[in-house]
Image (spheres, rainbow, N blue to C red):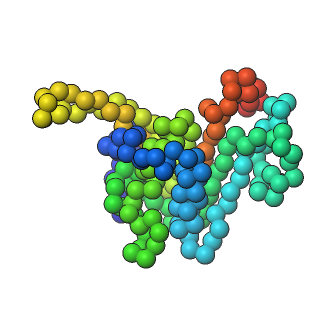
Amino acid sequence: MTETNRGKDFLGANITLDYCGEVWRDPRRILLDAIQNHIDAKNDTIPDITYTVVDPSGNVQQVTKEALATRDESWKIIGMTISDTGDGYPTPYLTMLGKSTKGDDDLGKFGEGLKMLSAAAVKQGITVLLSSRDWKATPTSYAQTVKDYETETDKTFDTLGYNLDWRAQHQRGSQTQFSFLTLLSDAKRLTVAQQA
């Protein structure tokens, strides 16, 4: 599939945030699906995963899984980055249900996982940044009003969309970054923001 959205700063997915259902309320499902997407991006290769952590004093560090294991429980994970070195994907995969780069025998071949993890993250206040090739996308929500022709009334839904940024430099593979700062208490969020 070719890139058809180059230069656009917003993409609407026409998927309500409620579409993702109960199974997506668990943040672990969001993370597992993101990891699986990166595993599928390059067969037989484990994606690179790094963690953003903060200690009680507000010190923020990027660490590997091995370094994370050496931190005591006072260090809290506030972010996670998953990267692969596959071919990447164009932005139409962000919005089109049923579009997938996977084969018939693969898990997740129905083309909804990326959209579902994005919608679930937005609904739960988890900040996500998706990037591949020459673009970065931040999932967001916007109000979309549709006409109910049976009742002749308008209904408004919170709908998934993506803010896009385009880069001159082409990146290899793709990356999913999660920030859990919105899930921290205000006091901790201020401490972390001061360190950045």
Which residue is found at the position 54% from the left and 35% from the top? Answer: 125
Percent x, y of residue 169: 55, 52
Location of residue 90 by image quarter: bottom left
In percent of width and height, residue 112 lies at 40, 56
Residue 136 seen in the figure = no
Is residue 157 left or right of 148 when viewed as pictured?
right
How many numbered badges does the structure rendering display? 0
Image check: 179 left or right of 131? Answer: right
The percent coordinates of residue 137 (x first, y second) are 48, 44
96 and 17: which is toward the camera: 17
63 w.r.t. 186: above or below: below
Question: Which residue is drawn at the image coordinates 53% and 57% (left, top)?
Answer: 33
> Which is more toward the observer, 124 or 91?
124
Q: Quadrant of the C terminus?
A: top right
Whether 174 is drawn above or below 78: the answer is: below
When asked about the image quadrant of residue 39, the answer is bottom right
49, above or below 168, in the image: below
Which of these two is toward me, 127 or 31?
Answer: 31
- Residue at 60%, 62% (x, y): give it: 84
Residue 189 in sight from this viewpoint: yes
> Where on the picture, by quarter, is residue 126?
top right
In the rendered image, which quarter contains the N terminus?
bottom left
Q: Position of residue 119 (x, y in %)?
A: 45, 43
| Residue at 62 percent of width and 58 percent of height | 83
Residue furthest front in the image: 22
